[in-house]
Image (spheres, grey):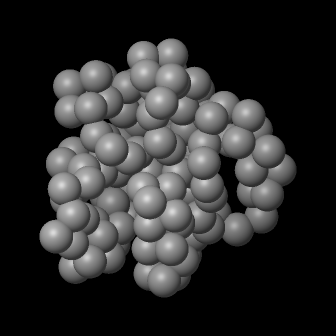
Amino acid sequence: MSDKTILLVDDAAFMRMMLKDILTKNGYNVVGEAEDGVKAIEKYKELKPSLVILDITMPEMDGIQAAKGIKEIDSNAIIIMCSAMGQQSMVVESIQAGARDFIVKPFQPNRVLEAVQKVLG
């Protein structure tokens, strides 16, 4: 079993549930969830997870701003961004904000796991 802890950030509860399901079934430990970027940064400070899976489009503060905020707290933070189809323009911005990888909704379990394994090693 993995001791890798993961924080899930998405404004849609069912998306977090789907991700959590994929990850926990495969031995990952989802330690927290947040529904916007502001809460994501607070939770990051509190939980210090190994990985943050961050949705781009959220109210209050979007994923790109949240990624920058998390990177300011911890420059070694590992972040995977996710977005809906057709937001490819955001990929570059995400990478610049410090994301290591990118997954597209609707989530393909294999792709999610491949991305997580790649960034967590």
> Which x, y percent locates residue 38?
40, 25
Q: Residue furthest top?
A: 72
> Which x, y percent locates residue 101?
61, 55
Q: Which quadrant is home to the C terminus?
A: bottom left
Q: Residue furthest right?
A: 89
Q: Which quadrant is home to the N terminus?
A: bottom left
Q: How many badges with numbers are in the image?
A: 0
Q: Is residue 108 above or below residue 45?
A: below
> Which x, y percent locates residue 66?
51, 29
Q: Is residue 5 above or below residue 65?
A: below
Q: Is residue 91 above or below residue 60?
A: below
Nearer to us in this view, 71 or 86: 71
Residue at 40%, 45% in the rendered image: 52
Residue 104 falls in which quadrant of the image?
A: bottom right
Q: Is residue 2 above or below residue 94?
A: below
Residue at 43%, 22% in the rendered image: 74
Residue at 21%, 64% in the rendered image: 2
Residue 84 falls in which quadrant of the image?
A: bottom right
Relative to 70, is 43 on the left or the right? Answer: left
Q: Does residue 112 appear in this view? A: no
Q: Residue furthest front?
A: 121
Relative to 26, is 56 on the left or the right? Answer: right
Q: Does residue 106 appear in this view? A: yes
Nearer to us in this view, 83 or 52: 52
> Which x, y percent locates residue 33?
26, 46
Residue at 50%, 44% in the rendered image: 79
Relative to 88, is 41 on the left or the right? Answer: left
